[in-house]
Structures are given as C-alpha cells and as structure tokens.
Image (cartoon, helix red, strand yellow):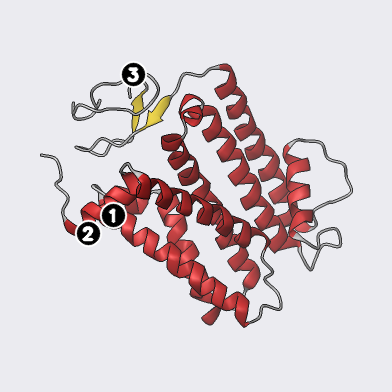
Amino acid sequence: MKHERKGLNRQLFWLYEGHGKWPFIFRWAMLIFDFLSIGYFLWAPFEHRDRTHVAFDYVIGSIIALDWLARFYIARHRWNFVVRPINIADVIVVFTMFAPLLVSNFAFLRILRAVRAIRAFTFVRRIKVLTPFFQRHERVIDKVTNLIVFVFIMAAVVYSTQVGVNDDIHTYIDALYFTVTSLTTTGYGDVLMVGTLGRVLSILIMGLGLTLFLQLLRAIVDPRDKVEHECEECGLTLHERDAIHCKHCGEVIHIPTRGFD
C-alpha cells in the first residue's frame, strides 16, 4: 500500500519532487544555495574571522538544517534517508556551523565542512530531472562528480594538515594545485608535501584519484549502467535502465529517463 501524503508533508513533497512553476523555482533556488555554500566552505577564511563571518555561518547552518529536516519528513524510508552519505554529510556540516562555540581547531572544521561538496551529488540528481541532457549522460556526469568531489575534499585535507608547517602551501589554491598535479601524475615538483602524513596523503591522492579517473574513462567507453530511482514499496534505489518492475519486491516502477517518460 502506497504512502498517502497529507497537509504539510504533501506541500513539502510537492516543492521537492512535484511539477509546476513553484517547485521549479524552489529547486533551482536550492541548487544555487548548494553551489554557493560549497564555494563558501572551500574558500572562506578560517583565520581572523569576525562577527559577520560567524553570523553568516549560523544562517547557512540553519538553512541546511531546515532543508535536511524537510527532506527527512517527506522521505518514505527514513532510515535509508538517514544513512545515505549525502545526508550524513549535511548533519556533519550543520554541526560544524555551530561548533566554533565549542571547538577551536578551525583547520579540523575546514576538513569537515569540505564534505559539503558531497552535496554536488544532489545537485546533479536534481538537474537530471530538470534537464534532458543530464538524463542522457547521467553515468558520465556521476563519475565526473565523484572525481571533482574527491579533489575538493582532498585539497581541504592537504590545506588543513600542511598550512603552517609547509613553506610551499599557504592558501587553499596551493593545496588544490598540489592535489590536481598529483592526481594527474604531472608532478611538477614545485609543491611538495612534508612529513609522514604528507607522504601518506600523496599516496592516497594518486591511488584513489587514478581509480576514480579510470572509472570516468570506463563510463565514457561503456555507457551501460544502472540508474538511481527509489522504489516506493521497498526503497531499493538502483535499477536497470529499462526496468519495469523492482528486482527486490516486484513493484511496478517508472524510471523518468529518456524513452520512459
């Protein structure tokens, strides 16, 4: 028996998943907010922060928290919602927005806030619904997103662990530059990591980064893949592109991809 939505649940579901002018405007507003918040977390200063920056943190944290609660409220399978990496990342970020009241290690907070970049997956998922181009190339776009998120998060880790102890790294751009050159195995040699931790991070960047890059190449060469579409009955999220019934429970599903609209 399918879940019947009423009242506030119905209205929120309409905004997040429905069709029409206002859901369209709302989703684009959330996409813009996601994009700007990711940029803010990656490049905002963490040293010598004034009251304006702190107030801005509280506002962003409150918006993310309200968005999380709304999506949790309309989720059919709430446990599945809670354990998804994207939603766990949002909880971590909300905590870090108010953590300066209790924590003084701002470098550590920068690493945690970088997980907001995982939100790019939600950005891509929503774009798929709005733009047919993203539906046709969703596998390649997902792999590109994997790679970009990995680069930004590792750059945040490099910055947080090397700034102040490494004469070659002074800004986030320096850390991003090192991450990209290591991942591509270019290795210009003008920026080097120091210490045992630095060498371990270099190995992780090259090893994991190359793996993600190879997955991207595979997605370009072999377009066959499963698509993400949650079954309303059992919550299974991955299905074959041409699936009509859920493999797990047999429920009829309608995957909104090209040819199945």
Q: Which quadrant, please, contains the N terminus?
A: top left
The Cα–Cα distance between marks 3 and 1, rounded to whole angstroms, is: 30 Å
The Cα–Cα distance between marks 2 and 3, rounded to whole angstroms, is: 34 Å
Dot 2 or dot 3: first in sequence order is 2
- Confirm or deny contact between disc 2 and disc 3 (CB under 8 A): no
Q: Position of residue 173 (x, y in %)?
A: 76, 55
Residue 17 shown left or right of residue 143 in the figure: left
Q: Where is residue 71 in the image (x, y as percent from the top left)?
A: 33, 54
Name the kind of residue labelled 3 in the image.
Asp
Name the kind of residue labelled 1 in the image.
Leu
Residue 242 got which mark? 3
Residue bearing the label numbered 2: 8
| Viewer-side residue, 196 vs 219 | 219
The Cα–Cα distance between marks 2 and 1, rounded to whole angstroms, is: 6 Å
Looking at the image, which residue is at 59% across and 67% down?
109
Image quadrant where residue 130 sits:
top left
Q: Which quadrant, please, contains the C terminus?
A: top left
Q: What element carries label 1?
A: helix
Residue 17 shown left or right of residue 217 in the figure: left
Q: Is mark 3 on a helix, strand or loop?
A: loop
Q: What element carries label 2?
A: helix
